[in-house]
Amino acid sequence: MRKDIYFAAKKVLFEGVSKEELLNDLLSKSNPNSSKTITTMFYGTLRMYFPFQPQLKKINQDRTLKKDIKLLATMAYVQFFQMDSIPDYAVMDEMIKLLPAKFKNVKKHFTWLLHEILRVGKSLDFSGFLPDYMASELKLSLGANFALDYEDFILNPSKKYFCLDSKATFDTAIKLNEDYPFYSISSFGSQVQKEILDQQGVICELNSMLIPYYFDESVGKDHLDLCSAPGSKLLCAKIRYKNDRIVGVEKDKERFVSLKKRVGDLLEVENVDALEYLNQDKSFDRIVLDAPCSGLGTLASNPEWLEFKNESIHHKKLPGIQKKLLKKALAKLNKNGQLIYSVCTFSKAETQDVIQEALGEQYKVKKLPNLIGEKHLSTEYGTYLLPSKKMGNQIFFVALIEAKH
Ligand SMILES: C[S@@+](CC[C@H](N)C(=O)[O-])C[C@H]1O[C@@H](n2cnc3c(N)ncnc32)[C@H](O)[C@@H]1O
């Protein structure tokens, strides 16, 4: 099956056959019990190659290019990115010299690859790797230096995976530490990982799981989680505030069904639009608003998103929805209550700008504590939790807001 997956991925990359079509074909030929594993492996293989697809495709399809160059190029990539070994840089250097002038961009890319091999990646210009709007968004929110570092995360994502699932979280003792309910599953075999997923586990990033832990101890007990599925922050909240009443709200019917299955009887969850839920005459001490967002901060785990995400996604609709949700939720905070607005994106329009607009006189943004060595970048309107080998691959924006009224 591994071989079939590899060949299917090759067809997607070099022949332009649709991913869905090939995946369906793979699934139809395999045991239904393995469908999750096959899907994960298929997308995993694509991810590995995705950032280089345009270059590899161009090289492999060009008739004028000598076969040995095609072969060398492909091998260099495979060796470096798939097998974690270093190709012979002298051969690479020769290869770059041999590339005809019309392959200007490919040449540039190979030069970059060679530099990377020689470990001088930090000084390279990465424009062209990320779409321009993403690169400029990154620079706008997080600065140019970080933008360069981030490329490293897309190419070499952290291999640590964490999981949160209601059963394991409440029943077993294999914890990251006593205070936080996340399980590192990287060292488990694939069979155990599969079982965890089958038991409705959520593979998660540490940064995102910490959200309910950022509230001050002194804040009251009424807890509302406004955009809940798949339920990771809700389950973390339940673990941190065992005896408090915690309510989760999810608008999407399908996502609600899996959320309900995951949280079982542990928590109260409602299938309703948050805006409608907030119409009722009730206020809260703690509100988590993990708003729908463009997800740009998850690029390192989903590099194939580079293909689908475009400017319109975050520039047009989302900030409006986020502001609407945030303003309405803030109005439902009790005196001295706290709200956490979080999104897994770095787009300024969905992060700092949303907070700046929604923040009235009676609210203030509080400094985020550092709990387990998160890498922070603080701004007046909230904090970006940055990726690190320890914390995972996501860029996560968090604003802790307190009601002064
Ligand atoms: C970023 S995800 C939430 C992840 C979740 N908090 C967790 O930690 O597992 C955003 C969720 O908000 C839901 N959503 C979007 N708009 C909503 C609304 N107006 N009311 C309630 N849920 C909404 C989406 O269906 C999606 O499941």
Image (cartoon, rainbow, N blue to C red):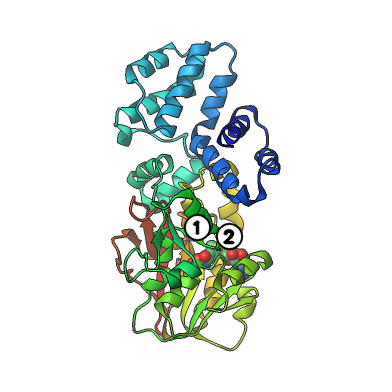
Q: Secondary structure at mark 1?
A: helix
* Amino acid type assigned to the residue bearing label 2 in the image: Leu
The kind of secondary structure element at disc 2 is helix
Residue 108, image x, y percentages: 43, 24
Is 359 on the left-hand or right-hand side of 230? left
Mark whose residue sits in front, 1 or 2: 2
| Among numbered discs 1 and 2, the one appearing first in the sequence | 2
Q: Mark 2 sits on what residue? A: 318
Instruction: Give the image location of residue 164, x and y in percent.
Output: 46, 64
- On the rendered structure, is 1 left or right of 115? right
Above or below, comparing residue 142 to residue 25 in the picture: below
Taking the image as drawn, is residue 358 in sight?
no
Residue type indicated by callout 1? Ala
Mark 2: C-beta under 8 Å from nearest atom of ligand 1: no
In whole angstroms, how far apart are the C-alphas of marks 1 and 2?
9 Å
Mark number, residue 349: 1
Q: Could you say where residue 183 lies in the image, as x and y percent from the top left? A: 40, 61
Quadrant of picture, ligand 1: bottom right
Is 159 rendered above or below residue 359?
above
**Residue at image coords 41%, 27%:** 79
Q: Which residue: 61% across, 48% down?
A: 34
